[in-house]
Image: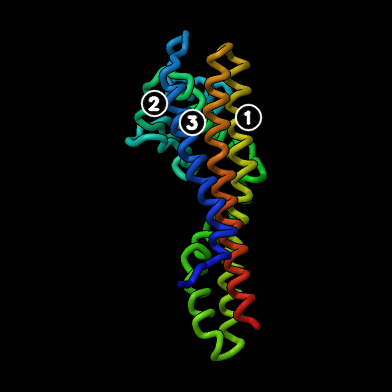
């Protein structure tokens, strides 16, 4: 029976780490969703307050269905908050809502990693769609001629763009959380143990982006090993 040791050694640990990170963010969010703020403000109200304090009165806030589907849409200039965040007065909801305002602030001030990530989105989409098919075709036909090995390497290069995208995402997400916590603390939206609840929620969420990078990077290294083996 064939055993793909490159997957077991490189990718599987990263996948397990990703599963743990996902479980941790869900359990942390659930825990602090039961810790309610003394001021009684909702996630939507907190986001609106932070946006207005930063002069972003033009950014709208909308309700979106789902759980932890929160995001900032720069194209529409809208922050969309999920069922568990929009109307919730929990510290977890406040943290997540203000994290999304952090992304809106990044776009407003021209934060460099956000510019880079936005610029490479089109080529990243192309890379994610074409990389694996090119690698499969290149490996399958590598015995026919060296040109197919080159095609496989082209697929690896396109997959590498996905790694770059994940890499640029890290400082973007960490910075958004720092901006959020700074605004929360400066305006006393949360205090004491409430602030700690928001911090722990955002820290757990940040791990999911680290895990996503780890999985993509390890998969990239595995693909390079497979293609380089065909080169011989």
Q: Which mark is residue 149?
A: none
Residue at 39% in and 21% down? 88
* Structural distance between the alpha carbons of marks 2 and 3: 18 Å
Quadrant for the N terminus, please: bottom left
Does residue 195 sit above or below 228 in this rendering? above
Q: Position of residue 35 (x, y in %)?
A: 45, 16
Residue furthest to the front in view is 1
Q: Which residue is mark 1?
A: 178
Callout 2 touching callout 1 (CB < 8 Å): no
Name the one closer to the observer, 18 or 91.
18
Residue at 42% in and 30% down? 61
Q: Position of residue 206 (x, y in %)?
A: 57, 37
Q: Secondary structure at mark 2?
A: helix
* Structural distance between the alpha carbons of marks 2 and 1: 21 Å
Q: Which residue is mark 3?
A: 58
Name the one closer to the observer, 123 or 3.
3
Name the one closer to the observer, 46 or 136.
136
Q: Which mark is residue 86?
A: 2
Callout 2 touching callout 3 (CB < 8 Å): no
Q: Secondary structure at mark 3?
A: loop
Q: Residues within 10 Å of mark 2 (few under 14, many from 20)?
A: many
* Structural distance between the alpha carbons of marks 3 and 1: 22 Å
Q: Nearer the viewer, mark 2 or mark 3?
A: 2
* 174 left or right of 79 in image: right
Whichever of callouts 2 and 1 sits on the residue coming sooner in the sequence is 2
* 232 left or right of 90 in image: right
Residue furthest to the top in view is 38
Q: Quadrant of residue 55?
A: top right
Residue at 51% in and 51% down? 15
Q: Quadrant of residue 226?
A: bottom right
Q: Position of residue 93 (x, y in %)?
A: 45, 24
Whichever of callouts 3 and 1 sits on the residue coming sooner in the sequence is 3
């Amino acid at each position: 029976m064939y055993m793909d040791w490159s997957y077991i050694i490189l990718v599987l640990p990263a996948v397990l780490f990703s599963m743990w990170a996902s479980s941790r963010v869900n359990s942390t969010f659930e825990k602090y969703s039961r810790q309610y703020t003394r001021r009684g403000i909702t996630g939507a109200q907190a986001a609106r307050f932070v946006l207005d304090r930063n002069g972003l009165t033009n950014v709208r806030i909308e309700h979106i269905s789902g759980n932890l589907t929160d995001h900032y849409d720069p194209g529409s200039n809208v922050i969309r908050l999920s069922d568990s965040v929009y109307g919730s007065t929990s510290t977890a909801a406040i943290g997540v809502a203000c994290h999304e305002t952090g992304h809106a602030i990044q776009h407003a001030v021209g934060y460099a990693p956000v510019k880079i990530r936005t610029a490479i989105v089109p080529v990243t989409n192309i890379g994610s769609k074409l990389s694996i098919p090119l690698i499969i075709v290149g490996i399958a036909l590598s015995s026919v001629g060296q040109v197919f090995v080159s095609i496989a390497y082209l697929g690896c290069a396109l997959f590498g763009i996905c790694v770059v995208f994940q890499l640029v995402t890290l400082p973007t997400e960490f910075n958004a959380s720092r901006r959020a916590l700074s605004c929360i603390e400066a305006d006393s939206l949360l205090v004491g143990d409430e602030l700690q609840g928001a911090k722990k929620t955002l820290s757990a969420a940040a791990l999911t982006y680290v895990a996503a990078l780890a999985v993509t990077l390890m998969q990239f290294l595995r693909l390079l090993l497979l293609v380089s083996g065909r080169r011989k």
